[in-house]
C-alpha cells in the first residue's frame, strides 16, 4: 500500500510518501518512507490510483488552503 500526504494531528497537510510492506502471513508489517528529489506539494483529500506494477498517479486534493490539481 502506498500512502501520500494526508492531514496531521494539527490539521496541517502533510507531504511525505510511505509504503507499507506486509509479510506473507500478514503477522508483521514495516513502513518505509520514500524519498524523492522533487516532492509534490503537501495535500489531503487527493487520489492515488494504481496504474501499473510500479506506477501510481497523484491527483487533486487540498493543500495549504488551496485546491491542488497537479
Image: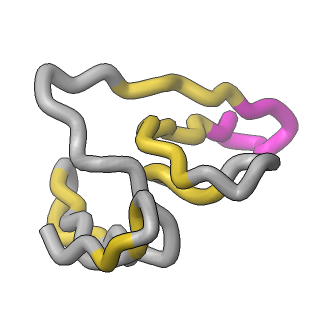
Relative to 22, say whether 46 is above or below.
below
The residue depicted at 52 percent of the width and 45 percent of the height is 14
Does the magenta segment cover residue 24? yes
Residue 36, image quadrant: top left
Q: Nearer the viewer, residue 26 or 18?
A: 18
Residue 10 location, x and y as percent? Answer: 77, 48
In the picture, the quarter occupied by the C terminus is bottom left
Residue located at (25% from left, 65% from top): 58
On the picture, is 39 further left or further right than 31? left
In the image, residue 33 above or below residue 21: above
Q: Is residue 13 left or right of residue 27?
A: left
Please state if 19 lies on the left or on the right of 60 as rendered: right
Q: Main secondary structure of the magenta part?
A: loop
Q: Is residue 70 above or below residue 34?
A: below
The x and y percentages for residue 54 are 19, 49
Front residue of 20 and 58 = 58
Task: Report the magenta residues as a range.
Answer: 22-29
The residue lying at 31 percent from left, 78 percent from top is 67
In this rendering, the count of numbered labels is: 0
Would residue 26 be counted in the magenta stretch? Answer: yes
Q: Furthest-front residue in view?
A: 65
Q: Residue 4 at x, y = what percent?
A: 44, 51
Which residue shows up at 77% across the image and 42% down it? Answer: 25
Above/below status of 64 relative to 62: above
Amino acid at each position: 500500500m502506498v500512502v501520500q500526504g494526508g492531514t496531521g494531528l494539527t490539521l496541517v497537510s502533510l507531504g511525505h510518501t510511505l509504503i507499507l510492506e506486509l509479510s506473507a502471513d500478514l503477522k508483521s508489517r514495516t513502513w518505509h518512507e520514500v524519498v524523492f528529489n522533487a516532492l509534490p506539494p503537501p495535500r489531503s483529500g487527493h487520489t492515488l490510483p494504481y496504474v501499473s506494477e510500479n506506477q501510481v498517479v497523484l491527483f487533486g486534493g487540498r493543500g495549504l488552503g488551496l485546491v491542488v490539481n497537479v
